[in-house]
Image (cartoon, rainbow, N blue to C red):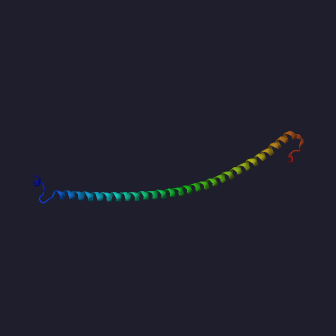
Amino acid sequence: MTSELRPPGSDPLEVIKRVKAVEGEAEARRRALAERSKAELERLRQEAESLVGQVRAEAERSREQILQKARSDSEGTAAQLLAEGRERAARITAKSSKELAKARELTLSTILGDFRPAGKKPEA
């Protein structure tokens, strides 16, 4: 009965040898594919690391440029604010001096009243 199931001229040992050979070839192809995949994965990892490094360097350069511009802008703004503050302080001081002179004149006029000749202001 076994001879009826077997194709004529086929040796069971030869079939097993052929199956083993095909399995070996398949295993060799699988290993080669795994090695190629591993190598490609490593190449892509290194490429990604390189790109990340480049992006980080560019981001750092950009950050430095932005900081430098902000420093420059803030220095200009600070100088402008200082100049405006000094100008306002000078105006207030001048105004205060004028108001002080007026207040002194008014006080002297009130105190001296009739003792001064009309239209004459005291010497400061």
Closer to the camera in the image, 67 or 41: 41
- The reply, left or right, for residue 15 in relation to residue 42 is left
* Residue under the image location 59 percent in, 54 percent down: 70
Query: Which x, y percent locates residue 69?
Result: 58, 56
Residue 112 lies in what quarter of the image? Answer: top right
Residue reaching furthest to the top? 111
Closer to the camera in the image, 90 or 3: 3
- The reply, left or right, for residue 98 in relation to residue 58 is right
Query: Which x, y percent locates residue 22?
Result: 24, 58
Closer to the camera in the image, 1 or 88: 1
Total numbered circles: 0
Closer to the camera in the image, 78 or 111: 78
Residue 113 vertical position relative to residue 19 in the rendered view, above or below = above
- The reply, left or right, for residue 36 in relation to residue 25 is right
Residue reaching furthest to the front? 13
Query: Which x, y percent locates residue 30?
Result: 30, 57
* Residue under the image location 51 percent in, 56 percent down: 59
* Residue under the image location 38 percent in, 57 percent down: 41
* Residue under the image location 64 percent in, 54 percent down: 75
